[in-house]
Amino acid sequence: MKKILILNLFILFLNFAYAQNPEKIADVSNEMLDRAKQFKNAIATSNGYRSGVYVYQKRTIADYQKTPEQLAARLAILGFTDVYLGVGRMLDEGNIDDEKWICNFNSSAHKFGMKVHVSGLSNSKLWVDNKRIIDDCNSIINFNYSNKKNVRFDGVTADLEPHIMKKNFV
């Protein structure tokens, strides 16, 4: 009985150690890992600087649809401290698979020490109708209230890009 308990504790320790190591989950070649370390040194996050990256739904999220943990691990080995996650439409649709993806990504990112901000407030209609702002904020609040702390968003980023404020923009 004692041997089984020790074996189970050892297996649990290995699982914990594996889960905390982004290099293993990232599944990259040694060359890619070396380049990631060079990039991380260049942005100096190990010296206390912060560095963020935008992750968009139609681009990156689509590529990592089945592997959100791998995406978080790859961002971690690059040294990013903050992720601006463009999932506004995913929150609005209420799709269980989308919410599961967000929960898995956020949980992994937090495990690797990153903060995750939902990138919202980027729709050009925001400047015409306050209802869209309220709807965007409510979807984020509802997500955070309905999930455990380890998967909640740490903040919101307003992705206000100059091209949506151009004169005569629709």
Image (cartoon, helix red, strand yellow):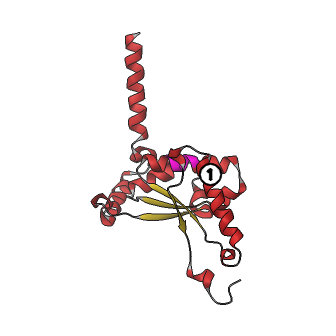
- Closer to the camera in the image, 81 or 135: 135
Residue at x 42% of width, y 21% of height: 8
Q: Residues within 10 Å of mark 1 (few under 14, many from 20)?
A: many
Q: Magenta stretch containing residue 93, yes or no?
A: no
Q: Residue 79's spot in the image, x, y percent?
A: 37, 58
Q: Which residues are magenta?
A: 103-107
Secondary structure predominantly adopted by residues drawn in magenta: helix
The answer to whether 10 is drawn above or below residue 86 in the figure is above
Percent x, y of residue 57? 61, 61
Position of the C terminus, as image quadrant, is bottom right
Q: Amino acid at mark 1?
A: Phe
For the residue pair 166 and 70, the one nearer the viewer reads as: 166
- Secondary structure state at the residue bearing disc 1: helix
User: Where is mark 1, residue-wise?
Assistant: 143
Return the x and y of residue 32 as percentages of the image width and height.
39, 56
**Is the N terminus in the top left, top right, bottom left or bottom right quadrant?**
top left
